[in-house]
């Protein structure tokens, strides 16, 4: 016999045996309808029904729920911070500014003749008394509402020389420049061998003598 034919017959016989074994295994398995049903899972017992059962209180949907403690504590603080106005910066207050007058009231004494004279000297103009030429630069008064105010004036005083030249204006010499104080005439006084001059007040008109 041909060996190839023998090999083909052996393969066919082996395949037929495998098919028979599979049919027997499928025949032994139970059908789906015959399988027992699965056991039911255990469920929790139902809640008790009766007077002993604790029911949650009803919720009124028309009322707004109270705020939480955290929000209740923060809300007043936030309102207070926004409503509090910012403090205005305090401007430093100093002494009141002096009141300036247009005229200085001066008094002069001639030591040789013992003559005294009170006169007015407008600010910015030169006033002459004998050999003295007085120019008031400023005249101001502090504490004007006080019964005893503090007048002061800035003066420039020149003294004319005795020898006068005909070819030009008379020559002069500056004998005083600075502030005079009516309440302290000796503090910054005119130093002149013939005349004494001091401030009386700052006013638009001369006070009564």
Image: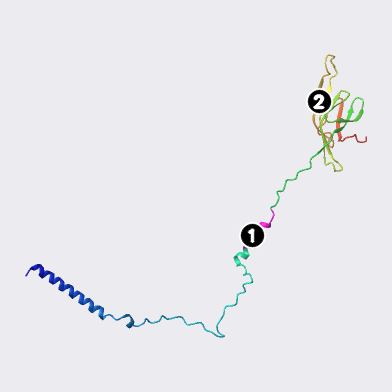
- Classify mark 1: residues with Cα within 10 Å, few (<14), some (14-19) or many (20+): few
Does the magenta segment cover residue 154?
no
User: Dot 2, how many residues are within 10 Å of its Cα: few (below 14), some (14-19), or many (20+)?
Assistant: some
Circle 1: element type: helix
Tell whether 112 sits left or right of 17: right
Task: Judge left or right: residue 20 versus residue 188.
Answer: left
Q: Is residue 81 left or right of residue 167?
A: left
Residue 107 % position (x, y): 88, 31
Main secondary structure found in the magenta portion: helix
In the rendered image, the vertical position of residue 32 relative to residue 159, given as above or below: below
State the residue in front, 191 or 60.
60
Residues shaded magenta = 74-85
Colour treatment of the image: rainbow
Looking at the rendering, which quadrant does residue 3 occupy? bottom left
Decide which of tag 1 and tag 2 comes sooner along the chain: 1
Closer to the camera in the image, 108 or 45? 45
- Residue at position x 25%, y 80% in the image: 27
The residue most toward the top is 167
| Above or below, 72 relative to 82 | below
Q: Where in the figure is residue 68, as x and y percent of width and height?
A: 60, 67
Q: Quadrant of the C terminus?
A: top right
Report the residue marked by disc 1.
78
Disc number for residue 132: none
Q: Position of residue 56 (x, y in %)?
A: 57, 78
Q: Quadrant of the N terminus?
A: bottom left
Residue 79 drawn in magenta: yes
**Residue annotated with mark 2:** 175
- Residue 185 found in image quarter: top right
Up the image or down, 184 lies above or below 174; here it is: below
Residue at the image position 83 percent from the left and 23 percent from the top? 159
């Amino acid at each position: 016999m041909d060996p190839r034919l023998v090999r083909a017959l052996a393969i066919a016989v082996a395949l037929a045996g495998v098919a028979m074994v599979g049919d027997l295994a499928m025949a032994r398995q139970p059908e789906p309808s015959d399988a027992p049903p699965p056991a039911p899972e255990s469920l929790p017992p139902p809640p008790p029904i009766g007077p002993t059962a604790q029911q949650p209180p009803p919720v009124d949907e028309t009322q707004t729920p109270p705020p939480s403690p955290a929000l209740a504590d923060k809300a007043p603080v936030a309102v207070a911070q926004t409503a509090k106005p910012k403090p205005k910066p305090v401007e430093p207050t100093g002494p009141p500014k002096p009141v300036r007058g247009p005229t200085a009231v001066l008094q002069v004494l001639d030591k040789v003749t013992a003559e005294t004279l009170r006169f007015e000297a407008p600010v910015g103009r030169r006033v002459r008394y004998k050999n003295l030429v007085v120019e008031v630069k400023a005249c101001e008064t502090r504490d004007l509402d006080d019964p005893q105010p503090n007048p002061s004036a800035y003066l420039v005083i020149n003294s004319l020389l005795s020898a006068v030249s005909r070819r030009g204006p008379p020559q002069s010499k500056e004998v005083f420049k600075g502030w005079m104080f009516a309440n302290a005439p000796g503090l910054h006084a005119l130093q002149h061998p013939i005349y004494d001059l001091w401030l009386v007040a700052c006013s638009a008109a001369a006070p009564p003598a």
